[in-house]
Image (cartoon, rainbow, N blue to C red):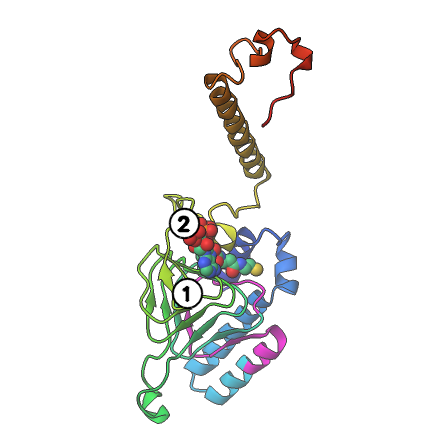
């Protein structure tokens, strides 16, 4: 069990650029504290101590702002970041390496039968491994969110989501990310965004350099276009005005 708790802490550090030490995760992360208390409430639930289990889960909610029903089945390394306002309903199932942000609901949908008959039916979502759900998103009903899918902040999802899809809006629709996702989808990126990995300073430096190269390339292209249209001769650095006899120093500086 200690090994699994340690792995959970490490996975939280890997997914949150703000986490600087294991101790910080233990004392400051409600998502971690909620998972520890869920282990306890789930064990009590499975032993049939249902009321005590519910009570422990409510204590956890008071401390962390995260409400997880004791019956919920959770895989390894769930990370609930910030946590406040997260609600996870009774028949939800959560795979490995899932990430939820604050305000997420894994909820039941409107009843078509009376609430007594619903008691033993699946009413809440199943999240497969690696799913990321953005802040404030509502995932409702006995649907399945496929492996590595991403749900945008504040989306409302009421239908199955295919593996690897990105869903946004109300009702949620599939979108194509502006930047293609990495082939290796097992590599987590903070906030679910392809450029959101701020943990590695080397990666940030390379990102900055690539941006700079992009900007310079655009400027060179624009200068070349001006050169071709005769406004500026890029080859020898002389301007159109120079051909008309003006000194280079009198030439206005480049427009870009
Ligand atoms: C859904 C998400 C994962 C997509 O990230 P991405 O791959 O970088 O996607 P892009 O930014 O390329 O957006 C793709 C399209 O979806 C739209 N979009 C992205 N997120 C959206 C959202 N939450 N709601 C509505 N539309 C959204 C973009 O405007 C874009 O539309 P366009 O192509 O018409 O311009 C990300 O936007 C998101 O919501 N992450 C959750 C972050 C979060 O909860 N952070 C809280 C941290 S405390």
Mark sitting on residue 75: 1
Mark 1 neighbour class, 10 Å CA radius: few under 14, some 14 to 19, many 20 or more: some
Query: What quarter of the picture does the C terminus occupy?
Result: top right
Label number found at residue 43: none
C-alpha span from label 1 to label 2 = 28 Å
Magenta stretch: includes residue 69? yes
Q: Please, what secondary structure does the residue beneath circle 1 have?
A: loop
Q: Which residues are magenta?
A: 58-83
Q: Earlier in the sequence, mark 1 or mark 2?
A: 1
* Residue 225 in the figure: left or right of residue 145: right
Give the x, y percent position of residue 70.
46, 79
Q: Is mark 1 within 8 Å of ligand 1?
A: no
Q: Secondary structure at mark 2?
A: loop
Task: For marks 1 and 2, give the one nearer the viewer.
Answer: 2
In the image shown, does 208 or 241 lie closer to the viewer? 241
Q: Nearer the viewer, residue 41 or 170?
A: 170
Residue found 50% across the figure and 29% down from its top: 218
Q: Is residue 97 left or right of residue 65?
A: left
Q: Residue at 37%, 80% (x, y): give it.
A: 109
* Residue holding disc 2: 177
Callout 2 crowding tier (Cα within 10 Å): few <14, some 14–19, many ≥20: few
215 to 123, vertically: above or below: above
């Amino acid at each position: 069990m200690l090994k699994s708790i340690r792995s959970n802490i490490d996975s939280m550090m890997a997914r949150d650029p703000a986490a600087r030490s294991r101790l910080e995760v233990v004392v400051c992360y409600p998502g971690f504290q909620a998972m520890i208390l869920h282990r306890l409430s789930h064990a009590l639930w499975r032993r049939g101590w249902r009321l005590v289990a519910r009570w422990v889960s409510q204590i956890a909610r008071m401390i962390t702002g995260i409400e997880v029903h004791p019956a919920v089945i959770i895989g390894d390394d769930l990370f609930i970041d910030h946590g406040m306002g997260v609600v996870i309903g009774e028949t939800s199932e959560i795979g490995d390496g899932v990430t939820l942000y604050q305000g997420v609901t894994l909820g039941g949908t409107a009843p078509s039968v009376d609430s007594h008959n619903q008691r033993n039916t699946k009413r809440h979502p199943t999240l497969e491994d690696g799913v990321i759900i953005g802040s404030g998103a509502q995932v409702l009903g006995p649907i399945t969110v496929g492996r590595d899918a991403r749900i945008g902040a504040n989306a409302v999802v009421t239908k199955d989501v295919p593996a690897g899809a990105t869903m946004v809006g109300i009702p949620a629709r599939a979108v194509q990310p502006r930047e293609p996702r990495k082939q290796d989808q097992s590599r987590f990126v903070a906030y679910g965004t392809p450029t959101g990995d701020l943990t590695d300073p080397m990666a940030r430096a390379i990102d900055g350099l690539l941006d700079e190269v992009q900007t310079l390339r655009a400027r060179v292209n624009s200068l070349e276009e001006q050169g071709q249209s005769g406004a500026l001769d890029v080859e020898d650095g002389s301007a159109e005005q120079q051909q008309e006899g003006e000194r280079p120093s009198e030439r206005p500086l480049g427009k870009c």
